[in-house]
Amino acid sequence: MAPRSGDAWARALAALRASPAAFVARVGAEALAAELLSELRSERLSEAAKVSLLAAILEFPTHLWPDPAGAEAAASTLLDILALLPPRPGPLRRPLLLAATSVLAACGALGPSSAASARLLPLLLLVAGGRAGGPEQRALQATACECLRELESCCPGLLAGQLGLLRTLQDAPGTQAHRLLFVLALRNALAAIARAGPGAQAGLQGLLAARSDWGEGQAWDWGLEAPLGQRPGPWDWSLVGEDVWDWATPPSQGADWPPALDLGPPEARELRAVVSQLLDASYLLTPPAQARTLQQLSQVLRAVRGQPPALLKPQLVRLLGTARVSLLHAVLALKDAFGEALFTAQDEALLLRRLVGAAQHPALPPPARLFYLHCLLHFPENWPLGAAGEEAAPVLLTPGLAAGLLPSLLQEPPDLLARLHLLCLLCGEELGADGPRDCPGTGAQALAYLQELLAGLRQGAAQPGAPRTAATLCFRACYLAARCLAGHPGALARLTEGLAKLYLARPCLAPHFVDLLEQAGAALAEPLGKALQQVAVAGAGGTQALRWHLQILTKVAGDQPMGPTLDFLWAALRQPGDWAWEQALLGACRALLRGRGPSGAVPGDLANLLQELARGLQDPDSRDRARLYYSLFTHLSGPKLGSALGPARSTPMLCSSLVEENEGFASALTVQEARAPLQLRRVPQRAQQAPVLLGLTVEASEVLYSLELRFRVLGPHYGPLEAVRVPCLRPGAPPKLLLLALEPRRPYPALLDISVLYATPGGLTCYAQLPSLPVAFADLFLPLLPPSPERSLPGAFQELWASCLPEGVESCMWGPWGGRALEALVAKHWEPFVVSATPPTRYQVAIRLPPSSQLLLQVEAAGEEGARVALRTDDWAILPLAGEYLRGLGAAA
């Protein structure tokens, strides 16, 4: 094959990053790896192109060399290329070191029998310990330290024999990368000595002894080859272990830590001196590096028995007033690790007040405020009142102190949920205490505010056409309230009543209710299930809501009285429906059968209902299923029936080859549920006349045949969509373009549920659920019909503008589109809908929203500050959606 050019390599690497497995399978891992190494050795490509090839090796080493032997040879080749570089600064040295390290570490080739490891480790130590002058040398030193840290993380204890050298490097050159490397090596060395047992503990002082006879103070050698007399001997692998300890979690919470290490007095003094030296110099590091150093040094102190945490006190005094998020997180980690041994009650109160103040500071960005709220929710207390692992608000966080953290409907959802979570915890504690109820800030007032907030969220979710985000936010808030107030029946009764009213108003939220019933505890699930059954059997919402009622009854009918559910199913049987409707009816019957008591006392109407279903259903599969349920019902007792219809607890062992053959034959004839090896992407479509077209591209990572893509718009506001059939998809082929014609009954955003049925080359038929795709408000935009030829366009727009009132509604807002930004906005989003324009200051936009609504915009520039947008519509229900759409454009400006 002819060598690739630079552009050809750029295209090939782009295809590799888009789908690594498919690209490597098509080209061949061995051929691609050989070609990459050959191009790195040649002089044909530029250095920039070689850097891009090395970046691909860094990203996909396991795809290129799946076996350790191939990775060993590749790392040796990369080191040979590094040794052949001319002795001058260049852009290839750092990527070559990183690539060789990544190949050895990721592909399992690092070890004492690896010749490439024996070459790479001394080379990295030589580069890290040399005397650096210019920025290129310092950058190369930092890269070598990063490579050593990566290797030490993969093989804990690898650098234990080099602690003396690494300690010497703290003074010269003493960069941040050297300090981070030494701290990691020290922590892992202590764990390795503890794992090795008492026989190795006497060697800690020897490991920490300074070594200055190799590489220290040498002039920089760009050849990267140590003099023969200064090359180290065979690498010591005796302390390397395969255990990767869970250092992030303390042993008190069940983490796997190495056994505590007992040191003699001289070694303990030496260790304290080393830790003190590192702590005293930590202020020179960047905040993230300081946080990592403090965390790992605290683990060093905890890994050695008898080491006092007071060594950390000077750093704690310095960091209690920090405004850096990473450093504050490190302080909280220290508090969680040492508690009252390091933090006094005054320290705890100060830290808590700082968190409360920062969580409501208006100058901080939302992610930072959210971080502080989560720190309050998981605050490590010195003396928590509850049991270990129990969720509770900090003891010192009183309702008065948290008054500024009350949630509001105007806040962003993450901020609102975190504040609401904190309020729920405070309400649970205040209601649990027998304190006065009439004092300001006590539990009764906090609970009243919480109930008002939850009522507001339910009201927002109950609005017709409310976005999915409003419903999701409401149910997440209700889940938090139910979890925190599980021990307070009065509060749960109010919550249950409100949720029942929400379902009465919008039965289409049934999937959210099912999820809430599964996640909430029995304290809420039992009364809520009873209330939902009462609403469902009453038939609220008419025939449009029957399928939602069946979904609810399938979840709750087994635990509730069966008479009302049976009456509802008899009434629902008279309604015509498709296969999905019949399966929903049978699902509710299955729930009744599983809920049959041990005495077998079930109303006789259930048997009659099953017989009627077996005779009257249209689909043969549904009739067979009804007959099966009837046979099980009439021949099995209650416990056996519940076990037969329940989920399988284990896979039965096959007792004969005939059964095994039949099982395989049945699986070949059954639709298998699998993860789809294909991907759908949205493709923008230029707005034209009706219908609304949604563009999708589909591509597969393996060969698929006879695909049937099924689309369903969730909610009642869209007509049904026809399935799309694709004969064949192959990896690497151009993406297949699909155009879906949407039929909106109302111009509301929605979610597109997608599933696929396909055949594999092995003859199996598979079914998969694909990720849902959103249908945004702007996806429904169509241009209005052009006016008649005798009218001017501005005149036609004014007629449309006047016709919207008085039946319609109007509003106005300001947008941050000053100067050329307004012209760019119109060209990008509204060009097909512009009726009249006076660029770049005035635009008249007319948008049709199917089936019969219209949205008119008059946009006028107001200097460089922004633009005024006046809007009118003949459909008041889309005004909030239009406002949200315009605010989104403004936020993206």
Image (cartoon, grey):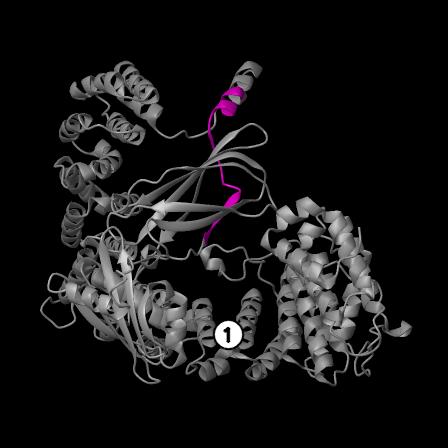
Residue tagged by mark 1? 309
Give the structural element (helix, strand or loop) at label 1.
helix
Whether residue 776 sits left or right of residue 458 in the image: it is right
Residue drawn at (23%, 35%) of the image: 550
Q: Quadrant of the C terminus?
A: bottom left
**Residue 346 sits in which quadrant?**
bottom left
How packed is label 1: few (under 14 Cα within 10 Å), some, or many (20 or more)? some
Left or right: residue 437 versus residue 22 is left
Q: Amino acid at mark 1?
A: Pro
Q: Is 235 placed left or right of 544 in the picture?
A: right
Q: Residue 146: where, in percent of width, then height?
A: 66, 69
Which stretch did the figure color magenta?
A: 665-682
Residue at point 20%, 64% (across, down):
800
Using the image, determine if residue 588 lies above or below residue 842.
above
- How far from the left and from the top, in percent, is residue 328? 44, 75
Relative to 741, residue 726 above or below: above
Query: Does the image show residue 408?
Result: no
Q: Position of residue 671 (x, y in %)?
A: 46, 29
Q: Nearer the viewer, residue 670 or 885?
A: 885
Was residue 376 drawn as part of the magenta stretch in this picture?
no
In which quadrant of the rendered view does residue 216 lie? Answer: bottom right
